[in-house]
Amino acid sequence: MEKKILRLLIVDDSPDDSELAVATLRKAGYMLKNQRVQDLASMQAALDKGPWDVVLSEYTLPHFGAQLALDLVKRAHLDIPFIVVTRNIRDPDLVKIMRNGAHDVVMKSQAARLAPVVERELRVAEERHQFRQMTKTLQEVENKNRAIIAGSREAIGYCQEGMHIDANKTYLEMFGYDDLSEIEGVPVLNLIEKSDHPRFKDYLRKASSQNPADPQEFLSVKKDGSHFHAELAISSIVLNGENCTQFLVTDISKRKAVENRLQYLNQHDPLTGLFNRHHFTQELTKTIERVKTVGSRSALLYLDLNEIKDINDVLGHAAGDRLLLKIARLFRDKLGESTILARFSGDEFTALLHDMSEEQIKTSVTELLSSLKETTFLEGGKVFRCDGTISVAVIDKDTESAQAVLNKAYQNCQHNRPQKTAPAPVPAPTPQATASAPPHAGGAEIPAADLHRETPVMPTAAVDWEIRLKTALEKDGFQLAYQPIVNLHGDPAEYFEVLLRLVGRHGELIHAGEFMAAAEKLGMLAAIDRWVIRQSIHSLAALHAEGRQASFFVNLCPAALKDPELLSLLQKQLSVARLKPGFIVLEADESAVMANPEASAMFMQAARRIGCRFSVDNFGNNLATLNSLREMPIDFLKISGSLIRNLSTDDLTRTSLKAIVDLAKAMEKQTIAKFVEKANDLGILWNLGFDYVQGNYFQQADSQPDYEFADETTLSSDTTSPTWVANSRR
């Protein structure tokens, strides 16, 4: 080792012996800084004075000696070589002093041994020092890593031989355990759904051969038995000297919900919920290949509605959409849930019939045609029938391709199609019949500024609105309609906007845009608001009684923001219904809020004290209102529909919406995009960061709050009939 200045403390009463030791070490190449002491007091003073590298001590001195000197070094917590240099020492004393901590004993008659012993002990002392430093550094690293793992948002667990041995808090919370003692010794397989066990075991084997293994997705199981989708990354590590496996778990349930939702929309018609043309063609190709392989028999059913175009022209596309929904439900009811159904184009439907004889196919077609002819459609005070033409193309081993069988079915359908005539109305049903079959409510509520987009249900010039509206209030002649508000990030919570309809003389539904102006002139808006609140709470309480934790967005007229009695009524109704106020979201138009911002803010604060939330509709048209709105207790901003309609074609609109969403996030307010009507818009809105979407693309406003928020997870391999717009709860 490299020689250096050696600070040497000598405990000896003989100057000559001390000088001999100094000379020996100098001869070995050491530069010395030495001091000699011979009693306890002087040694204590020397130890207090400064650091020493080596202590050389005579074993026996008058009233002092190596034993006492060694005790002083220990009490000073000095880790330095202590070497006994003596003329004579008995074997028992040598053993005793070595056991007490002396590093070696050198006889003065063997002075040549002194330098190698000192050199060795200095080297060992340096190694001990380095070991302590490394141990301290390792402990600091371990503490740091332990703190990182304990406080990490990532779920991290450790197992050995398939059993849990450690886990951080996030891991425990993710799987529903309260503390580590509950999960210690629990097999890792207990946290994986049984159907995924073979794949998980194979993944574990791969993880032992490659470190780390690529992440994989599994269906995981919590302590209470509930399931969630998780992504696992596994790696082999050494923990406390033992080989074990580290699990990094990420809950991807929300991501999977969004992926499944987008996949669902890619495969299905947004209006009817049936498969779309692209996916049906894929299924048809699979069917042809299966028929050629196993020799079974299938058939393609092709339905062309004869009068849908005329109904669209006469009654409007909203009416045509409601008819298409009715036909889709009829199709599903008659052909069964296992049949692959599709809306092939605007007025054409297709179906794949598997493993049916020719007679069974003929019977199914006959029953379907008969049901179709008997189907009536009420709109605009009149009842219409809409017939259709059906053709069947057999799929057997001689079928060439999907396109060939589709062409054959289409040509047969066109050949059998009757000459088109205008849809003939049939006599309107009696009032009793109308009452027993409530009409289907459809179409999103459209504000006054957008009335040109919707065909009026009936002329209103000659209507005595005062009588009709008073009668509706007295006899519950209004009807609520509900349109879902869907979370874009996988949250299955149910949200509906409550819309108002007036039931007409013939059972038709009149949109609020047709009569609210008259109600305002007649001073009836406050009474209508109260009716809506009472009925909304009653309807919401019924849903909660069924176990559905839905929330309602309830629209208020501008005058309501200055009506303190309305909140008293709301609080009373909530108390009677035993409904938590947080499930009610009051909504007002931005223009109404900004007409009197002080009164609006007071109204919102009072609603917040009750526990209700608040939403501002048609936000974004005038960003100058932002400074006023940012201080108000607003939970949701519903973006103006005028900014959504040109979303897919207007780059400037997308830029504006991105700025609006960023502002809303900065204000800690959630955003809702309404009037969503196209599939392309959905992906754009998701990328822009919108929280919720609403519009006819998902479902038109209906008389029942029925929408499967959590069940839109049909995978490409799943060919069962979709249920996301079906009224499955009715």
Image (tube, rainbow, N blue to C red):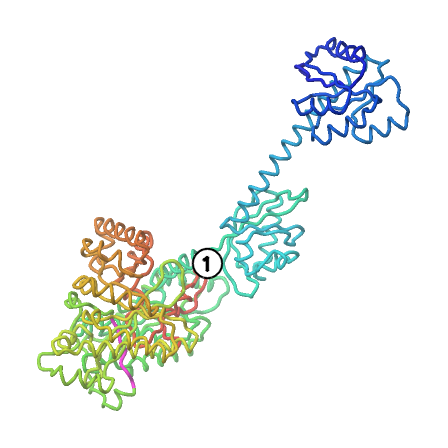
Give the image location of residue 557, x and y in percent: 20, 71
Q: Is residue 393 visible?
A: no
Check disc 1 and report the residue beneath it. 253
Q: Which residue is nearer to you in this view: 402 or 82?
A: 82
The answer to whether residue 524 is above or below residue 278 is: below
Circle 1 packing at 10 Å, graded few (<14), some (14-19), many (20+), is: some
Q: Which residue is nearer to you in this view: 20 or 243?
A: 20
Left or right of 451? Residue 232 is: right
Quadrant position of the N terminus in the picture: top right
Which quadrant of the figure has residue 419?
Answer: bottom left
Give the image location of residue 659, x and y in percent: 26, 50
The magenta span reads 437-443
The answer to whether residue 130 is above or below residue 727 is: above
Left or right of 71? Residue 525 is: left
Q: Does dot 1 land on a helix, a strand or a loop?
A: helix
Q: Which residue is nearer to you in this view: 503 or 241?
A: 241
| 441 in magenta | yes
Give the image location of residue 449, x and y in percent: 15, 65
- Residue furthest to the left: 461
The answer to whether residue 332 is above or below residue 208 is: below
Which quadrant of the figure has residue 610?
Answer: bottom left
| 492 in magenta | no
Please, what is the dominant secondary structure of the magenta stretch?
loop
Q: Is residue 627 visible?
A: yes
Give the image location of residue 625, x and y in percent: 20, 56
Q: Amino acid at mark 1?
A: Ser
